[in-house]
Image (cartoon, grey):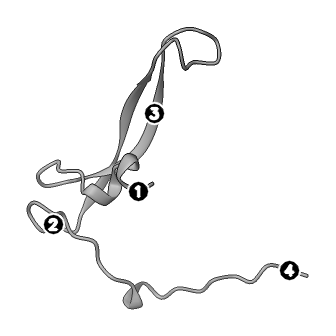
Amino acid sequence: MEPQQLRLNPKDLQDVKCEECGSELFRECVLIKKVSALLSPNGRESFVPLPTFACIKCNHVNTAFVPENNG
């Protein structure tokens, strides 16, 4: 059995706006989280990149785009 494809019309979707300035344009960016040596699988401090989005006009990152706010 083949998986069903979800067909979305962009006109039917809700626009996301910046919480600070109301802009609807965002750019991709990366949050960097530090992993302590105690939690790291190799015993050394390391960093984990987390992709997110920032407003192209004011650089604000909406609360919903921050990973720890979504879990």
Contact check, label 4 and label 2, Cβ < 8 Å: no
Query: In this rendering, would 18 be left or right of 71?
Result: left
Decide which of tag 4 and tag 1 comes sooner along the chain.
Answer: 4
Q: Is residue 70 above or below residue 15?
A: above
Query: In this rendering, would 12 be left or right of 40?
Result: left
The three-letter code of the residue at mark 4 reads: Glu
> Which quadrant of the view contains residue 65?
bottom left
* Disc 4 to disc 2, C-alpha distance: 39 Å
> Looking at this view, is 44 or 50 the one in front?
44
Decide which of tag 1 and tag 2 comes sooner along the chain.
Answer: 2
Residue placed at 38% from the left, 47% from the top?
68
Q: Nearer the viewer, mark 3 or mark 2?
A: 3
Task: Identify residue for label 1.
Answer: 70
Task: Identify residue for label 4.
Answer: 2
What secondary structure is marked by label 4? loop
Q: Which mark is residue 23?
A: 2
* Disc 3 to disc 2, C-alpha distance: 25 Å
Task: Identify residue for label 3.
Answer: 49
How packed mark 4 is, by other alpha carbons closer than 10 Å (few <14, some 14-19, many 20 or more), is few
Q: Measuring from the top left, give residue 67's x and y in whole percent.
A: 40, 48
What secondary structure is marked by label 3? strand
Q: Is residue 42 above or below residue 64?
A: above
* Disc 4 to disc 1, C-alpha distance: 31 Å
The three-letter code of the residue at mark 3 reads: Pro
Decide which of tag 4 and tag 3 comes sooner along the chain.
Answer: 4
